[in-house]
Image: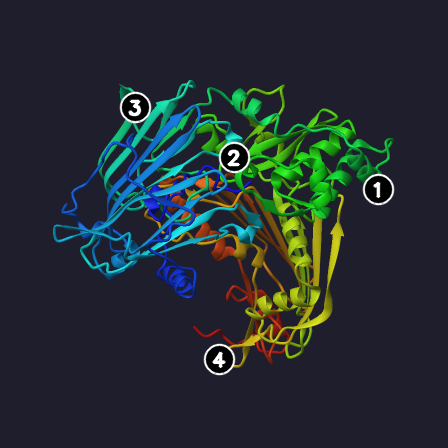
Amino acid sequence: MAAKFWLAATGKINPVIILKNCALPSLVSKLMVAVLMLLGHVAIGKSTEGYTVEDTPGWVVSATSSVEASVNEQQYRDGVVYLLVDRQWYVTDSNQSQYSHFQEKALNPSGVTEISRVSIDFDPSYQKLVLHKLVLHRDGEVLDRRQRSLISLIHREQNLDVQIYDGSKTLNILIEDVRVGDVLEYSYSIEGANPVLHGHFSKHLGLRWSVPVKNLHYRVLWNSHRPLRVSNYQTDLQPKINTLALGKEYVWQRQNVTALVLEKDTPSWYDPFPELHLSDYQNWKEVIDWALPLYQVSTSAKQNKILSELNIDDEANKETQLLTALKFVQDDVRYLGIEMGERSHKPNEPDQVLEQRFGDCKDKARLLVSLLRAMNIDASVALVNTNSGRFVERGLPSPTVFDHAIVFVQLQGKKYWLDATRSYQQGTLSSLYMPDYEVALVITPQRSDLVDMSKDVRAVHKKEVEEYFNVSGNPDKPSTYLSKTRHERYYADALRSDLAKSNLAEVQKGYLDYLANIYPKIRVAKKLRIEGDAVNNAVTVIEKYLIPDIWIRNDDKETAQAGFEPFLIQDHVKQVSTLQRTMPYAVLHPVEFNQTTRIRVPAASSFENEFVEVRDAAFFFTKTVDFSRRQLVISYHYKSLQDHVDASEIAAHAQHVKEVLEQSGYYMELQLGLLDILFDHGKVNWDAVTKGMKAIGLDRLQPQP
């Protein structure tokens, strides 16, 4: 199930796209399309294969904007003024039509590049594309460009990189002779609706974007027996409602819509962009009822054969049975989504998935549920939104707000959420990694509303490092370094996945290159080793090196320094990039990092014990230094407390992060040729110095300022 299901087909105009703050198409991508067209993917002017050219439909109400409107050019991006965004829908019990109408003005050469290309996406398996208008407004003239454009209908799989084929097509239009100051006006209709939705209608209509819009016009002409529900998010805009011969008319209009730029590093759930939510589903029970026939399961000889081949003993522990079936669906059924037409929401039959040995999240979830029920395990498919459960909660009921299917299991009084699309998972049910999608819609007749899944998956994802340095010998000879890094839950899954796509030699080289940034002459002393802990879903990486240059001589040639960096803390705790914020700042959560550095130091060394604590609204950090019997132990602990920091607390958070990074490191200084005496952070251990001086008769010497 692709993440774009709830997005309406719109064309090039980014303000119309529901995904927020999208970058406008790059010049490079446009040039690539142009090259493809010139190499033969071109249908010149008169050819209309795959689409038609017709007049504007009679149900549409005209909406225009002055092409001579004055604008503040400093408020616009990429040299384009969006004068008009007009979208209208006509919904009946038997059909749906969407009309889109835009006006864009080129302010400079960059703007010319932007408006000279139009792209319209649609699914030809159930939709018909009709082009209405394609004109340029120039110096009071209206220039028809339908016969002076390069028009190409291409099959472009935009989600191919994530193994999803949706069958959509794109009508690309390259317009000739566009000049600075021109206003491009174009309109088209897309007729038809996905049959899998059984005539239901739902939309999310943006009211503000990262670029300004002079005139915004939404209209819905409703002629269906199902009532249309409307709800607002971050807006009080109400529709004008009229009763017409063709149905009930809803109209929303706004002028001079200002830009709203999303700040960097905001949490995924944060969405300040106002929206209108439309749906003809009255409650979540209706969505469940819609989904039940799609996800019904039944046993079959093919499934029983698979269970037999997996050697699942009927007398075995139920958890063992479940984990065996889960591993089979995850690893033996590869992920591949053929989501053309109604397959966007309708899964294949479990037997077909077994036969072809591939499927998307819907297919794999349905198959797993079918296998589990055959073993008398209570399991159901659950629909989630991978971006934010809050997006689901704040909107109206609709199946189009979900982009992923997982599995909900109740076993021995406990609840578990499983993802059949994840690979290389290990562990018990309680230790398996599962993202927290906040809420889910469990597809079972026993449910009638959203389910809170957060309380069942609140697991902390850990990394722990134990490292050992021996710097007690001759400073001119290599020191030994041993590191053990333990990855748990999410980090364990990610590491196993990386290892499956690589090999130990490549991993070893990557780790060596990383450490060489700190110790340039470091070399491998022993081959890297991987140890798995399947029960606790953990993976440990063991590394051993020799470091010839751990002591760096100072300019005076009489002293040398060695540094010890807690890379685990420094890799995951980052400085705040900007203190001027009005939006929440995202923090990695829920995570816990522990790094312990044990250093064997020269004889007669002495260090003071330390304890440092930093408390923040989003995390807790400690550093402990303990010295005993020639071993210096430096321990770092970081644990997240929440996934964001409010804008009002960003200054304090930035200061706390700075304190953490300042404390993340330990430095020693060695007196060469006179005494093997260590200094902590540049502060001389004068007790040790005095003892050393007395031992060699130099106690009358005074330290220089």
Q: Earlier in the sequence, mark 2 or mark 4?
A: 2
Instruction: Say which element carries label 2.
Output: loop
Q: Which residue is drawn at the image coordinates 79% and 30% (left, top)?
A: 375
- Judging depth in this view, the residue of 102 and 203 nearest the camera is 102
Quarter occupied by residue 208: top left
The answer to whether residue 223 is left or right of residue 427 is: left
The answer to whether residue 618 is left or right of residue 90 is: right
> Identity of the amino acid at label 3?
Glu
Q: Earlier in the sequence, mark 4 or mark 3?
A: 3
Instruction: Say which element carries label 1.
Output: helix
Q: Nearer the viewer, mark 2 or mark 4?
A: 2
- Mark 2 in CB contact with mark 3 (< 8 angstroms): no
Q: In what quadrant of the picture does the C terminus appear?
A: bottom left
- Mark 2 in CB contact with mark 1 (< 8 angstroms): no
Label placed on residue 555: 4
Q: Residue 212's x, y, as percent?
A: 25, 44
> Identity of the amino acid at label 1?
Glu
Mark 4 nearby-residue class (10 Å; few <14, some 14–19, many ≥20): few
Residue highlighted by disc 2: 402
Q: Residue furthest left?
A: 140
Residue highlighted by disc 3: 249
Residue highlighted by disc 1: 309
Q: Residue 472's x, y, as percent?
A: 68, 70
> Identity of the amino acid at label 2?
Phe
Q: Earlier in the sequence, mark 2 or mark 1?
A: 1
- Judging depth in this view, the residue of 571 and 404 nearest the camera is 404
| Cα gap from disc 4 to disc 3, whole angstroms | 81 Å
| Cα gap from disc 3 to disc 1, whole angstroms | 60 Å
